[in-house]
Image: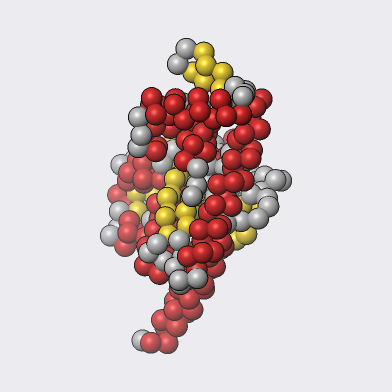
């Protein structure tokens, strides 16, 4: 049986807070303190430095954390392997997805995955690409899904879906022509995603291919939310550049209008990102499931014209 005290230590060490550890594990803060004292007495070391309401890991605590991460990962693998004997797929899967993927891409695949594997324990956090990569390096998640172009050398990336970014304007303020020259595009007010977002990275890369920089554009402001950008553009004369996956409904009901810009196109991939070393079996199963689902969706879409 898994030593619950190791789970308590791990929660406290990752949060650097006994109160947050208590909330995460649904126990009281005095119970967390009791478990930590028991561990410290058992190993005859101090695991945490306590200064007021703040705690930090001691050198002994750092060593404990490194080993506890490995132990908890092995318990997950053991649980998965033993349940496979009864044809169950039990295990924890902690996912992190950049904003566009979390809001507009992964939910249908995640729902289908849980229908196939109802015993899986899945959680999902979202942020921009840099935040998801940081969560992965800090072992807060098992698998990331990002849209960024920049690659961290210590992480492994594999594409699972192609994406296109499109230039958009509010329908009420659309220019007479839907095709813009580069010079026209450069003068029109523009709203973009924030620094650290994969969307902005992709835009910068493809602008660079045309010898353009962000400073060459008339950027009105940066916003940290795709939904906020869509609403802003619908109520202003500004343009925006967003993933096609995020604007299907707005194009269909006429709230946004797609524009083309001479010589400019914005392409990228959505990618899985993993840390080095062995991966959890549940992580590999989720990756395979999504890849197969995406491939099947692509086949179905190609077959649609032949059905009419």
Up/down of 169 relative to 297, above or below: above
Residue 229: quadrant of the picture:
top left
Q: Quadrant of the C terminus?
A: bottom left
Q: Is residue 31 toward the left or the right of residue 270 in the image? A: left
Q: Locate residue 149, reporting x and y percent.
A: 62, 49
- Kindly give the residue lying farthest to the top in the view shown: 52
Up/down of 31 relative to 213, above or below: above
Between residue 144 and residue 219, name the one nearer to us.
144
Between residue 60 and residue 44, name the one nearer to us.
44
Q: How is the image coloured?
A: secondary structure
Q: Locate residue 85, reporting x and y percent.
A: 50, 70
Q: Locate residue 170, reporting x and y percent.
A: 34, 49
- Taking the spot 38% from the left edge, 25% from the top edge, the residue there is 30
- Taking the spot 45% from the left edge, 83% from the top edge, the residue there is 303
Between residue 115 and residue 186, name the one nearer to us.
115
- Answer whether residue 189 is visible to the viewer in this image: no
């Amino acid at each position: 049986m898994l030593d619950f005290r190791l789970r308590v230590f791990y929660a406290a060490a990752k949060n650097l807070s006994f109160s947050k550890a208590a909330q995460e594990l649904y126990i009281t803060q005095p119970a967390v303190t009791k478990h930590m004292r028991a561990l410290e007495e058992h190993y005859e070391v101090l695991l945490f430095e306590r200064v007021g309401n703040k705690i930090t890991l001691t050198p002994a605590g750092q060593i404990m954390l490194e080993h506890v991460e490995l132990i908890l990962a092995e318990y997950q693998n053991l649980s998965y392997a033993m349940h496979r004997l009864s044809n169950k797929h039990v295990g924890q899967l902690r996912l992190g997805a950049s904003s566009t993927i979390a809001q507009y891409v992964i939910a249908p695949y995640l729902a289908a995955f849980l229908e196939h594997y109802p015993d899986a324990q899945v959680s999902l956090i979202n942020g921009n690409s840099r935040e998801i990569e940081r969560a992965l390096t800090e072992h807060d998640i098992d698998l990331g899904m990002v849209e960024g172009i920049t690659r961290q050398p210590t992480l492994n990336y594999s594409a699972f879906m192609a994406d296109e970014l499109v230039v958009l304007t509010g329908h009420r303020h659309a220019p007479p022509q839907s095709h813009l020259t580069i010079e026209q595009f450069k003068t029109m007010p523009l709203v973009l995603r924030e620094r650290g977002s994969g969307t902005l990275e992709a835009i910068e890369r493809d602008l660079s291919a045309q010898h353009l920089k962000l400073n060459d554009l008339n950027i009105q402001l940066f916003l940290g939310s795709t939904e906020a950008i869509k609403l802003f553009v619908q109520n202003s004369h500004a343009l925006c550049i967003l993933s096609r996956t995020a604007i299907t409904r707005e194009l269909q009901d006429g709230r946004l209008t797609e524009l083309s810009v001479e010589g400019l196109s914005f392409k990228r991939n959505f990618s899985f990102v993993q840390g080095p070393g062995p991966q959890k079996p549940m992580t590999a199963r989720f990756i395979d499931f999504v890849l197969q689902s995406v491939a099947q969706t692509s086949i179905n879409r190609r077959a649609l014209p032949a059905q009419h």
